[in-house]
Amino acid sequence: MLKKTFTGLFSAHERISYRRLMAFCAATGLLYVDKLDAESWVLVCCCFIAGEAAPKMMSALKGN
């Protein structure tokens, strides 16, 4: 069990993306305090994930 926990936290292939988790938590918090509506909540999370993935996509398209 301990090995699985350490692998989940520190393995580059299996760990949680903490930036995505933080965007999700921040958007959920804003939704909870009624600063975002449901549609905006989805847009915040999707835009963050898309923005994070854009440089990787461009490097893949360029063949780097």
Image (cartoon, helix red, strand yellow):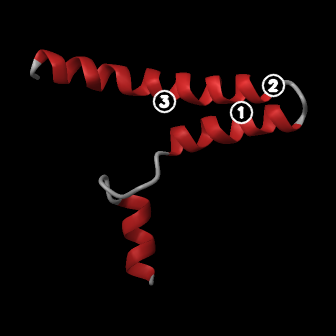
Seen in the image, is 47 located left or right of residue 58? right
Residue flagged by tag 1: what amino acid is it?
Ala
Q: Give residue 47's position: percent from left, percent from top.
A: 54, 22
Binning the other alpha carbons within 10 Å of mark 2 as few (below 14), some (14 to 19) or many (20 upward) gives some
Query: Would you say 13 lies left or right of 9 here?
Result: left
Residue at image location 31% in from the left, 52% down from the top: 12
Count of numbered badges drawn on the protein:
3
Q: Residues within 10 Å of mark 1 (few under 14, many from 20)?
A: many
In the image, residue 48 above or below residue 15: above
Ranked by sequence position, the earlier of labels 2 and 3 is: 2
Q: Three-letter amino acid code at disc 2?
A: Leu
The kind of secondary structure element at disc 1 is helix
Task: Give the amino acid at mark 3.
Answer: Ile
Give the Cα separation between the discs numbered 1 and 2: 8 Å
Label 3: state its secondary structure. helix
Residue wearing tag 1: 27
State the residue position of label 3.
Answer: 49
Residue 56: name its quadrant. top left
Rendered-image quadrant of the C terminus: top left
